Image (spheres, rainbow, N blue to C red):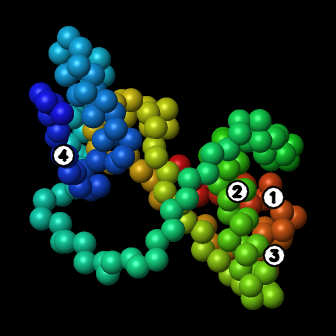
Amino acid sequence: MWGSLAIAICASHRVMDSGCFSSFLTAWATAAHTTGKLLIQTYFDNHSSFPAENLPPNDDPPYENIVAERYVFNSKAIQKLRQRLTMTSEHPLSRVVAVSTFLAQAPLHADIARRGKARAALLGQLNNIPERTISSVPKHAFGTWISSSFLEIAADHTAEDALGENFPALASRICHTTV
């Protein structure tokens, strides 16, 4: 291509998450292709959220077998899940909790099918923290805004949770471990 420009950008996940990175690049590209005026104002004010200086390097061994999947859920299916969960709860649960509960059942069920019996489990997930979760975080704040949550399930509860017999209780526990 004649007259084109390619720019490569590399950033540490310690400094920014993918949502922040995407917003920043969108604002930059829009400003470059239009009037030069920023349509999205990125906030760099929250320096306390950035990592401290001189953190030790990440020495984790390389992962050899990584499987990444993207699942897109129909909004009507999510609404059905939420209704199923809300019947036993006084407060409507979020879409994130409904889908997380549904997804949590899959590895539990697969483990029981593979081993023939239930065993204790630890479920973990990372959640992007949007501006509506923490009011002091602006929509286009620059940084890494994630929360991790972990749920321990005893062996005697694993079978109930995997088979959906205790779907609302599992959702309630996931809700309490999630920001």
Q: Nearer the viewer, mark 4 or mark 3?
A: 4
Mark linked to residue 167: 1
- Lower position in the chain sequence, tag 2 or tag 3: 2
Q: Position of residue 158 (x, y in %)?
A: 76, 75
- Lower position in the chain sequence, tag 4 or tag 3: 4
Q: Position of residue 47 (x, y in %)?
A: 20, 43
Residue in view at x 13 percent, y 30 percent: 2
Check contact, mark 1 vs mark 4: CB within 8 A: no
The N terminus appears in which quarter of the rendering?
Answer: top left
Helix, strand or loop at disc 1? helix
Mark linked to residue 8: 4
Question: How far apart, in angstroms, are the residues tagged by discs 2 and 4?
Answer: 38 Å
Q: Residue furthest front?
A: 1
| Label 2 crowd (10 A; few <14 / some 14-19 / many >=20) | many
**Residue 167 location, quadrant:** bottom right
Q: Amino acid at mark 2?
A: Thr
Question: How far apart, in angstroms, are the residues tagged by discs 3 and 1?
Answer: 11 Å
Check contact, mark 2 vs mark 3: CB within 8 A: no
Q: Amino acid at mark 3?
A: Ala
Is residue 149 in view from this perspective? Answer: no
Question: How far apart, in angstroms, are the residues tagged by discs 2 and 3?
Answer: 14 Å
Mark linked to residue 159: 3
Residue in view at x 25 percent, y 27 percent: 29
